[in-house]
Amino acid sequence: MCGIIGISAKADVSNDIMTCLKSLSYRGYDSAGMAMVGDGQISERKIKGKVSNLEDYIKNNPISGNCGIGHTRWATHGEPNTINAHPHTISKISIVHNGIIENYHELKTTLKDNGVNFISDTDTEIISQLINIELMNNKQPLDAFIHAISKLEGAYAIAAIFSDYNNLMIASKVGSPLVFMKSKNKTIISSDAYSIAEFGNNITYLEDGDIITSQNNKIHIFDRALNKIKRPSKRISKRTKDGLNGHEHFMMKEIKEQPDVLSYALSNYLDFTEFDIKENKFDFDFSNVERIIISACGTAYFAGMVAKYWLENIANIKVDLEIASEFRYKKMFFDEKSISLFISQSGETADTLAALKYAKQNKQRVISIVNAEESSISNESDLVLPIFAGQEIGVASTKAFTCQLATIASLVLYLGGLKGAITKEQKETYIQELMHIPSQILQSLEFEQTIKKISKDIYKSSSALFIGRGSTLPLAFEGALKLKEISYIHAEGIASGELKHGAIALVDKNLPVIVLAPDDLFYVKNLSNMNEVYARSGKITMIGKVDNEHLKGLAINGIDIDITGKFNIPIIMAVPLQLLAYHVAKLKNKDIDQPRNLAKSVTVE
Ligand code: AGP
């Protein structure tokens, strides 16, 4: 993640921008920069390192102006250095950006073939270059901006200033957060409400596709067709300052954050410039490892189930998977060729910590995949792989689960390469697939209205079944857990093939059955299981490769998540399941962020 800020006012804004950058530095801080427009030109100051480095640099190389942009970076493309730091200024345009431009390779190749010289290794520079080309073709700034961003794919938030316009800012977002505030004498655009809360009480949250212009403190918001639109402003309450960002529940905020945080998590381990793995992140001797013992609880355990499927089928490494609360009471057959891997969002779950200590007592080397880097589990580990999900407040885990999977996918690619199970070409293909996850999550979030309707068919039920196969069988368990822990409806995940061995006795016209049927090698078998359910009047909701024949014939509801890719399918399939649980619980007026009997971190055994 990165933090972007833009401020236009009647007086110098450089100090305000610096203040906001300090508040935004939690979003990344490997480099920082600022650009100001004035007297027909853009002045830029940027430097490697934290925002404090930029502050010292600007003290010795002052910059001022009434309209400017700022950025604090967490590198996704291009190493952290001054050239790759934002803003990226090309002639009359300067921009800052948060997110990943997924098609930047193609765009950059085309522009280079047309003689455009690039300065940096970033994906961001492509945006400046595209806008600059439109400006040189005599387009007005807004027209140039819209033409340029229409070529972009991925999740991003962008803010731009123009040398020929002393007080013009243009910004837009798709998938990454962007808010704005208008006070009596200044307009502020930022990645989050928290960083600008000191400047006022009313915040407006932009929606995906919105384009905002601020000129001489006059604000206009447009959709992509350049229709003027309005967005309601919200009064910043105490909770908003705590980070609800306009959402009713932290769970929904965290579901919607997934395009942004997954870009962050994936780019920590994968180099999207070279389509390679950042091997230095896996500083651990795997040379004699032939088996991995994985252990966790709850949602993290289901992430471990996906890990087992991927490690065995892609990296060709044997995995034993154990529920943490059972782990230390079982004969675990530790040996010198096995290591133990623990997955935990909080890093404090007592069952998982106890299992980790048991493994260490048995001379196991330990790896942990955690969200809370400063935690008991990470402190006890020989290698820690952070998931970069950011603080997760909702008790029902959402973004942490998908970020766990993204981190596991990176580990699988690293180990697969190390063990010779994955060729260089396969690795590059997998990394290119993973790079599209933020936009695929965005596509799955677009089904929210459909899912709200489907939740009306489910919320009065007393029970529900989730069925899946292969790498989406863990998603069946996870979907059932999400539903039961926040709506209190009993739900069960089960292997589709197991249905006929008993659970099908439950199926009747009152039982919702959620069938996970992605376009994978189990698709045809999943359809035959749907027929078994249909034949007994089960109420089927199909999530996956949905086409009319199956929807009209077998399912009453369908969510067409037509994603391919061994890693992408389980990660993307989590989102409709999260949204379904959320909307069912909302219809039942449950306490979604803090369900009864639960805690965010279970620190007792
Ligand atoms: C998930 O939605 C639940 N809140 C719960 O199962 C959780 O995943 C489990 O308690 C493990 O927590 P951890 O990841 O912090 O170890």
Image (cartoon, rainbow, N blue to C red):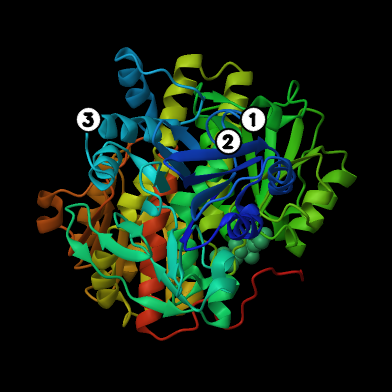
With respect to residue 22, does 527 lie above or below? above
Q: Is mark 1 within 8 Å of ligand 1?
A: no
Secondary element at image label 1: loop
Task: State the residue position of label 3.
Answer: 137
**Image location of residue 26, percent across then percent down:** 65, 55
Q: Nearer the viewer, mark 3 or mark 1?
A: 3
Nearest to N terminus: mark 2 or mark 3: 2
Between disc 2 and disc 3, the foreground one is: 3
| Amino acid under disc 3 | Asn
On the image, the x and y values in percent for residue 458 come to 30, 75
Report how far apart the C-alphas of labels 3 and 1 lie in the structure: 32 Å
- Establish whether ligand 1 lies closer than 8 Å to the Cβ of label 3: no
Most foreground residue, 509 or 231: 231
Indicate whether 61 appears above or below 604: above
In the rendered structure, the answer to whether residue 37 lies left or right of residue 509 reads right
Q: Residues within 10 Å of mark 2 (few under 14, many from 20)?
A: many
Q: Nearer the viewer, residue 497 or 468?
A: 468
Q: Nearer the viewer, residue 84 or 255?
A: 84
Element type at mark 3: loop
Q: What SS does tag 2 mark?
A: loop
The disc at residue 81 is 1
Instruction: Find out whether the residues at labels 2 and 1 contact each other: C-beta distance under 8 Å.
Output: yes
Q: State whether residue 438 is above or below residue 338.
A: below
**Residue 470 visible here:** no
Q: Is residue 575 visible?
A: yes
Q: Quadrant of ligand 1?
A: bottom right
Q: Which mark is residue 85?
A: 2
Residue 532 shows which numbered tag? Answer: none
Q: Amino acid at mark 1?
A: Asn
Q: Residue at x 54, y 23 (%)?
A: 276
